[in-house]
């Protein structure tokens, strides 16, 4: 009997090629694991594909609920946008997938772990580090180890009778409930606008002529209702993806710094993520003090960087989570978003913990804010700056 390896399997080009490589080059039997984090793939097709590749066993694990509650929700609380743009859809899913693969590896008593990541991306970092944190088994990454490129893979796939669909030939896609990442092909020219057919979630033509409103209620930093309806976590994300995507919201196109030092042009569809983070951070500004808001933005960007760079399991992330969770105790309230032909804007917010006081802020009559007190405050506030300027002039 051959030794076994367990492989994180999506059914796409890379992981299909890897199954064959493990069998042919390493003489290993392959156990495949597909972790469903909302890719929207037909699981029966993936299982059939695994079977056609001759795997000895295939697992399908539905981890959608865990993904939303344990990964997406914390990222909303952290307003997590890497380099202010990327909602970390892929980055959040990797540690969860890797953890599930290790669990199966223990159960199946295999001698190696495997993944289909290349040596150029971030996913290898996320898979390797989570796997190493949870297991001592060797990690085989054939695409990286053999320095394979896509044309070589496509050729290998054809030679071994592995079927690849047309979208996969055009772009490299990774998708889950939180977003869809589109890479490769024509998108590698950073000056070229992405073609319409790159997008599936976001409508780019014939958008509605009237604005659409979306109301989101948060409780302790977590979205619990959309448009007045209490929805379970997965449904809520799906609902917003569909509604906002239909209004042209959710496309992100930016230059991203990968962990390994490469600058890449990244295109995403992330309607729910953009709406929820926009709404959540707006609500925070209403309920947190200015000191909390200022400090939390530092914590948030560190959190996003840790997750992006594969350090989901670093103790620092837990420590930041403690701060973030404490800060969310008052992040309860409702935010109203307006969407119109691809533009997104917060147009209203309310909370029982609001620090906004109409009475204080109003320019109208009868404000309780005594303007006369401001004079002395401003003098003290600017004391050092005005003095420094005066001295500079003298010299
Ligand atoms: N740049 C993003 C990230 O590092 C998306 C990666 C998409 N992965 C993929 N295998 N196509 O998280």
Image (spheres, rainbow, N blue to C red):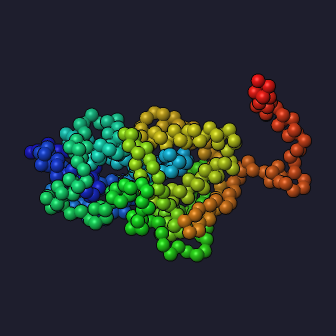
As drawn, 212 above or below 297: below
Where is residue 340 drawn, in percent x and y? 59, 68
- Taking the spot 14% from the left edge, 43% from the top edge, the residue there is 26
Relative side of 184 to 2, left or right = right
Q: Decide if residue 287 is on the left or right side of residue 163.
A: right
**Residue 129 shows in this picture:** yes
Residue 33 vertical placement versus 315 (above, below): below
The x and y percentages for residue 197 are 39, 68
Q: Residue furthest left?
A: 1
Name of the residue lying farthest toward the top: 395
- In which quadrant of the rendered image does the C terminus lie? top right
| x then y, percent, for residue 221 | 58, 50
- Tell me which residue sits at (79%, 31%) in the image: 386
* Residue drawn at 34 percent across, 35 percent down: 133
Locate residue 314: give its quadrant.
top left
Whether residue 237 is visible to the viewer of this picture, yes or no, is no
**Is 278 left, or right, of 234 in this rendering?**
right
Q: How many marks?
A: 0
* Quarter of the view holding residue 289: top right
Residue at x 64% of width, y 52% of height: 283
Q: Quadrant of the N terminus?
A: top left
Based on the displayed image, in which of its 4 quarters is residue 55 positioned?
Answer: bottom left
Between 329 and 168, the one lying in front of the other is: 168
Judge from the rendering whether residue 265 lies leftward or rightward of residue 52; answer left or right: right
Residue 239 percent location from the top left of the image? 50, 65
């Amino acid at each position: 009997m051959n030794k076994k390896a367990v492989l994180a399997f999506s059914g796409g080009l890379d992981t299909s090629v890897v199954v064959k490589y493990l069998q042919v080059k390493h003489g290993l039997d392959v156990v495949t694991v597909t972790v469903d984090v909302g890719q929207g793939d037909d699981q029966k097709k993936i299982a059939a594909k695994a079977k056609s590749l001759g795997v000895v066993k295939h697992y399908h694990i539905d981890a959608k609920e865990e993904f939303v509650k344990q990964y997406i929700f914390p990222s909303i609380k952290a307003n997590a946008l890497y380099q202010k743009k990327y909602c970390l859809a892929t980055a959040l899913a990797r540690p969860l997938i890797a953890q599930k693969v290790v669990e199966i590896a223990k159960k199946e008593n295999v001698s190696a772990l495997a993944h289909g990541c290349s040596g150029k991306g971030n996913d290898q970092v996320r898979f390797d580090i989570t796997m190493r944190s949870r297991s001592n088994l060797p990690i085989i990454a054939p695409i990286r180890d053999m320095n394979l490129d896509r044309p070589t893979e496509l050729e290998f796939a054809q030679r071994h009778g592995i079927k690849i669909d047309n979208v996969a030939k055009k772009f490299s896609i990774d998708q889950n409930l939180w977003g869809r990442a589109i890479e490769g092909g024509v998108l590698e020219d950073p000056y070229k606008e992405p073609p319409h057919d790159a997008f599936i979630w976001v409508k780019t033509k014939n958008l509605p002529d009237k604005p659409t409103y979306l109301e989101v209620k948060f409780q302790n930093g977590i979205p619990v209702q959309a448009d007045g309806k209490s929805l379970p976590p997965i449904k809520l994300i799906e609902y917003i993806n569909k509604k906002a995507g239909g209004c042209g919201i959710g496309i992100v196109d930016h230059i991203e710094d990968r962990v390994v030092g490469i600058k890449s042009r990244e295109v995403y569809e992330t309607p729910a993520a953009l709406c929820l983070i926009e709404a959540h951070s707006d609500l925070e500004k209403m309920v947190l003090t200015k000191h909390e808001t200022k400090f939390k933005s530092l914590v948030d960007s560190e959190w996003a960087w840790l997750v992006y760079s594969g350090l989901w399991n670093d103790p620092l992330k837990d420590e930041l989570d403690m701060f973030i969770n404490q800060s969310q105790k008052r992040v309860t309230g409702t935010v109203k978003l307006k969407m119109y032909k691809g533009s997104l804007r917060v147009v209203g917010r309310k909370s029982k913990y609001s620090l906004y006081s109409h009475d204080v802020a109003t320019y109208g009559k009868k404000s309780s804010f005594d303007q006369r007190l401001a004079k002395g405050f401003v003098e003290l506030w600017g004391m050092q700056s005005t003095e420094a300027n005066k001295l500079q002039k003298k010299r």
